Image (cartoon, rainbow, N blue to C red):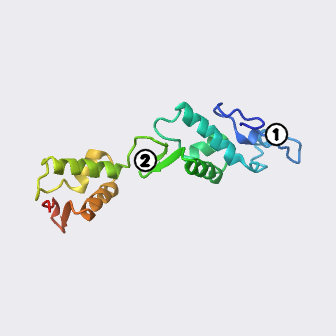
Amino acid sequence: MGGPGISPLSPGNHVRSWSARTSTGTTAHEAEERGGGVSNPSPRGTFLTIAEVLRARIAEGAYPNGLPSEAEIGSEFGVARTTVRRALRALEKAGAVATVAGVGRQAAGGSQVAPYKQIMTDLLDRIRTGELPAGARLPSEAELAESYGVARGTVRRALHELEAAGHVQAQHGVGRFVRPAS
């Protein structure tokens, strides 16, 4: 599964440690350690090796709060970001990873919800329970952004979704209000 020079569960192992020799007779990893820079591109299929390593880590539960960023994975394996993206795309196609808007990549079946959807759900619950009755003014975008710890754009998206669904009505320059049930 790991290929030459790679132990899939050992952090810090670089894909470039494969024993491809340069014209000077050193490996790419040795040349890089001496300050010679990257002399050889990653071998074909490297993204599949990375995908398998990540799949094994996901199965072990190593990423409960989501996968590391593309940059972090690329740095760990010593590969370009496009190689990491190919590995992650392969995992997404296989159903092992899902992308959650505003959160990042999660192991499939993860419980995290996009922040705008959480705001929508919370506001709908407040409307349904009567805490925000028909005609009540919703908190401002700035107030909601501060209380949820998100950007105003995230709040705006949640409010637009509620408007489109007919739960909320915007009055320009005044605010957003709960629509009467129809």
Q: How many residues crowd mark 2 within 10 Å: few (<14), some (14–19), many (20+)?
A: few
Q: Amino acid at mark 2?
A: Val
Q: Quadrant of the C terminus?
A: bottom left
Residue 49 appears at what percent x and percent y? 69, 42
Q: Amino acid at mark 1?
A: Ser
The residue that mark 1 highlights is 19
- The answer to whether the residue labelled 2 contacts the one labelled 1, judged by CB atoms less than 8 Å apart, is no
Q: Is residue 78 visible?
A: no
Residue in front for this viewpoint, 27 or 160: 160
Residue 158 appears at what percent x and percent y? 30, 56
The reply, left or right, for residue 55 in relation to residue 145 is right
Residue at 11% x, 57% y is 134
The reply, left or right, for residue 80 in relation to residue 25 is left
Label 2: element kind: loop
Could you tell which of marks 2 and 1 lies nearer the N-terminus? 1
Residue in front for this viewpoint, 173 or 43: 43
Q: How many residues crowd mark 1 within 10 Å: few (<14), some (14–19), many (20+)?
A: some
Q: Which label belongs to residue 98?
A: none
The residue that mark 2 highlights is 103
